[in-house]
Image (spheres, rainbow, N blue to C red):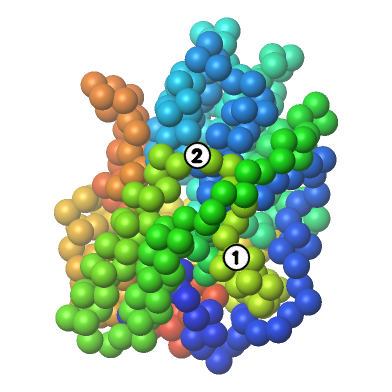
Amino acid sequence: MLHLLRISNVDSTNEKVSGCTDQQLGQFLPESNSSVELSTGRSAIAYLIEKMGLTANDTVMLPSYVAEGVVRPFQLLGINVDFYRLTPKLQPSLDDLSRLIGESSRARLIVVIHFFGFKASIEPIRELIGTRDISILEDCAHALFGDYSPGKAFGTTGDFSLFSLNKFLPVPDGAILLSNNKKINLKERPLEFFIEDTDATNAYLTHLKKNELLYHSNDPKESTRLIEESGRAYDLYYDKINTNLSFRAPSKNTREILKNLNFKELIHLRKRNVQFLYENFSSKSIQLLNKDYSPDAVYFAIPVLAKNCQERNQIFKTFLQKGLFASTLIERWNFIPKQKEPKYENEIDFMNRHLLLPINEFLSLEDMKKIVSLLKQI
């Protein structure tokens, strides 16, 4: 079963991205004034809230289509949240941001997400901010290793950037927060190295193992069972971390796995798979959200759109029967304010119509050919 879920054994094809390597993750991250490594993305955001001195008197601006892990820390710590609109391509609506900035005297932070690894433009938002004391946090959870252009990495344009490792890598936890703001040194506060949450770590490792078994499964019934078991393991992990904002370092498991990853090969294989998919994409029933891709980016997945929600659900079932698990990101991502749904029509349309095509490093060219072949049949 082809899918975009992370797996425990990254050496699942003949094209290896694991084994002894002298590569360090830091070599592939953008330079910054200071940085800190924590166990989860939400704890990294809580850490940033503390370092910025944000209080209930301050406002942060987020898209309403956003991972719960980004919203939750602000909510738990009592920070006011304003949700801005997105364009049909999931870019920040500059008109809506301009309105919100103009209406709010308490705005301190704008979170901008590089959805699925596709570039979100930061400079126009910087121009809207002008001389206001408002910082920008680049959410690079889907954009690890990506560049705006050669030598210009994601995470270098905002005041801060956040990378969540287990969105991209086969690790149970780990997040890296970078600061380009000379006034805020992220290293000034020592981390509290609490006893590791082994229940959360073990649950995520089970999730990774089930995903590996799913990749090797050719039986529809077994694949369905593995998808359900993987989901239960992830839910158990999620329940453990959802409200835990403690400032812990990444687990020992994560540190050991990172030592043995070949990041150069991982980047190469993802870029190869994206190039192949785009050059051979053809379908009568679905279309690419973004007609073009950048050879400088390293993508999380490739979003496509069906004509409507009903057709999307039918295509999902057809793909599943033919060995392709095309994921969606809807659960824990919909934060559209109640009674304001019409205002966020682009976000609703995307959630109703999208599927995510996998381009993971463990997928071989034969796997990608199968995906292309299935697309042509739809």
SS class, disc 1:
helix
Numbered badge on residue 245: 2
Q: Quick check: 351 left or right of 11?
A: left
Please, is residue 184 above or below residue 11 in the view?
above
Q: Which of these two is toward me, 270 or 108?
A: 108
Q: Which of these two is toward me, 129 or 210?
A: 210
Numbered badge on residue 252: 1
Q: Amino acid at mark 2?
A: Leu
Q: Amino acid at mark 1?
A: Lys
Please, is residue 53 above or below residue 10 in the view?
above
Residue 110, quarter of picture: top right
Q: Are marks 1 and 2 in contact (CB under 8 Å)?
A: no
Residue 118 seen in this snapshot: no
Residue 168, quarter of picture: bottom right
Numbered badge on residue 7: none
Residue 11 seen in this snapshot: yes
Q: Quick check: 78 left or right of 220?
A: right
Q: Residue 369, percent across and down?
A: 44, 83
Q: Quadrant of the N terminus?
A: bottom left
Work out whether mark 1 precedes mark 2 in sequence or the reverse, and give the earlier one.
Answer: 2
The structure residue drawn at horizontal position 36% and vertical position 43%, both measured from the top left corner, is: 333
Q: Quadrant of the C terminus?
A: bottom left
Q: Residue 93, percent across and down?
A: 50, 29
